[in-house]
Every structure is written in structure tokens, then in C-alpha cells.
Amino acid sequence: MEWVVVDDVSTGLAMYRTGQLDCGPMEFWTVRQHDLEALQQSHPHLQYQDIQANGGALLAMRTDHPPFNDVRVRRAISMAFDRQALVAALAGRGQPTPAIPPGLVEWSLPIEQLGAGAQYYQYDPQEARRLLAEAGFAKGVQTQLSATVGTGFGTDLLDSVQLIQRLLKDIGVRAELKLQEFGAYVATTARGKFEGLAYGRIPIAWYADWPLYRPYVQPDNMSHVNDPTFTAMFTAQRRTQDVEARKHMVFDMQRYAAEQQYYVYLYAVSPTASWQQYVKNYAPNLTHDYGGRAAVLWLDR
């Protein structure tokens, strides 16, 4: 096996078109939705399969510091975002996501079933500005927005972060962009060591527990959540063996998360996996276990 690291998105796509790569050049061996239609027309012999991601994008914030310790501010920030516009900017296809991404079909709640928290998923800049004023920030908020651009997405992720910055400005939240190299981001921001806001990712949901544990319960959760109510709910679902009973408890946790907005969940993409015809015994797998999937496939050529 030869692992090829290609930093430039266009170069990766060109290598895939010419058969220098066996699978799609993007994360999880996919192709960008922006490139998909042209690629399917020019290379109909390639294999394609649509997938619903079991991860997604979010906005974390320092809920242990003002102004983000005020739920009205967090709700205002959530209502600042046109989530479908963000999907179009980064991925082309996808949908808004609750705390558990829609790829985990049996455990993820549709947005309209989030109860009182569903309203904070609506794009409503006017209501967002009213909430900020009610919280004492009629003149707006000055903060920082940390993000990384070193994850192989080319300009897509930067475009998305800049759109987030603009939408925040529309409601009076002026966020200074702090871009970090990927290693520095993982060592600091991803561990909750940042000021203000941070653009992050929902942990890949192999099972319902993980996207709830990592952001809310573990000591270095990005948003510094310290909510005894949520922790008690989390512990109770872990101790429940009846699957249906536990499922309803997980649903309640997603509703509670939507009300509190400790994290502003943005979207989960719907990527398209692609691979050459000669790649056998392969199916898309939205995890980072690249070695495991490579170990069981073979090339028939």
C-alpha cells in the first residue's frame, strides 16, 4: 500500500480522474459535491455511493465565561445561522443536525421533534438581536472565532468559517477570525483552550453515547459545559439496558441540548463516496479506520 498525502483539493481530484488514486481524494474517500456532477459525466465508470454523515459541524463557545454563560446569548447565536446556506458553502448537500448526527438514524431526532429547542434552529436575525439586547448586549458582542484550515478541505472550510463570521456580524456579534495550523488547533482549541467561539466538528457517532460524552461530560469538553442536569441524564442512559427506554432518554438529551445551546449544531453533510471499478470488497465507512478497510480490499487489475 502507498498512502499519498495531497494537500491541494484540485490536485487530488486530477490524480483521481487520471487513475493515480484508487479512491476519492477527500476525507473518507469521497469526492466534493461541487465536483460530483462533472466527475460523473466525464467518468461514469467510477463507483459512486451517497452516504449520510455520522458527524457534522458545530460552533463551540466558552460557556464558563461571559457573555456565553447566558443562555439567551447562545440561543441568539444559533438563530444567526442559515444552516442550508452553510451546507451549500461547504458541502453542497446535507441537513441541519441535532447533538446526534442524522447518520445514526435510530438515535438522531429530526429538528422538528426537538421540542422547545427547535425554534433556535430557525434562521431569525431579528429575534437573535432581540435576545442579545435582552441579555444586555444591545450594542453587540466583540469576540474571537478560532478555526483550522489544515484538514484537506482546501478553501471550502475557510469559505464556511467566513460565512459564519458574516452571519454573526449581521446580529451584532463581531468575531475576529483566528486561523490555526491543524496540529496547533488540535493541541489547543479542540481541547477547549480558546477564547470566545470555535468552529469544530461533532464527534463521529459510531454509537449514541459518544457524541454526548465527548462534548459534554469529559473534562476537556470544548464548550466547558458543567451542567449537573445533563450529566445526570447522561449517566442514567448509560445504566439503562432496555434499548427502547434508553432511546427515549437519548431523545430527551437532544431536546435539552437544543434548549441550552451549549454547542450550536450547524449541519451534517451528505457526501458521495467514490472508488475505481477495480477496487473490490469495499464499501464506504465513515470512520478514520482507513487501515482496516484497506486490509480487506483488493485491486483487480
Image (cartoon, grey):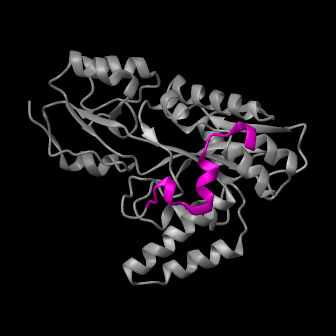
Task: Specify the quadrant that holds the N terminus.
Answer: top left
Task: Specify the quadrant that holds the C terminus.
Answer: top left
Relative placement, left or right, of 265 versus 32 is right
Residue at the spot 41% in from the left edge and 84% down from the top edge: 241
Residue at the spot 68% in from the left edge and 75% down from the top edge: 229
Relative placement, left or right, of 216 versus 63 is left
Residue at the spot 27% in from the left edge and 45% down from the top edge: 284
- As drawn, the residue found furthest toward the left would be 301
Q: Main secondary structure of the magenta part?
A: helix
Residue at the spot 68% in from the left edge and 57% down from the top edge: 262
The answer to which image quadrant residue 223 occupies is bottom right
x, y percent for residue 176 = 78, 31
> Magenta span has 31?
no
The answer to which image quadrant residue 233 occupies is bottom right
The answer to which image quadrant residue 258 occupies is bottom right
Seen in the picture, residue 142 relative to 281 is either above or below; the reply is above
x, y percent for residue 22 = 24, 30
Q: 164 or 157, which is in the foreground?
A: 164
Answer whether residue 264 is visible to the viewer in this image: no
x, y percent for residue 31 = 34, 29
| Boundaries of the magenta span | 108-127
> Magenta span has 123?
yes
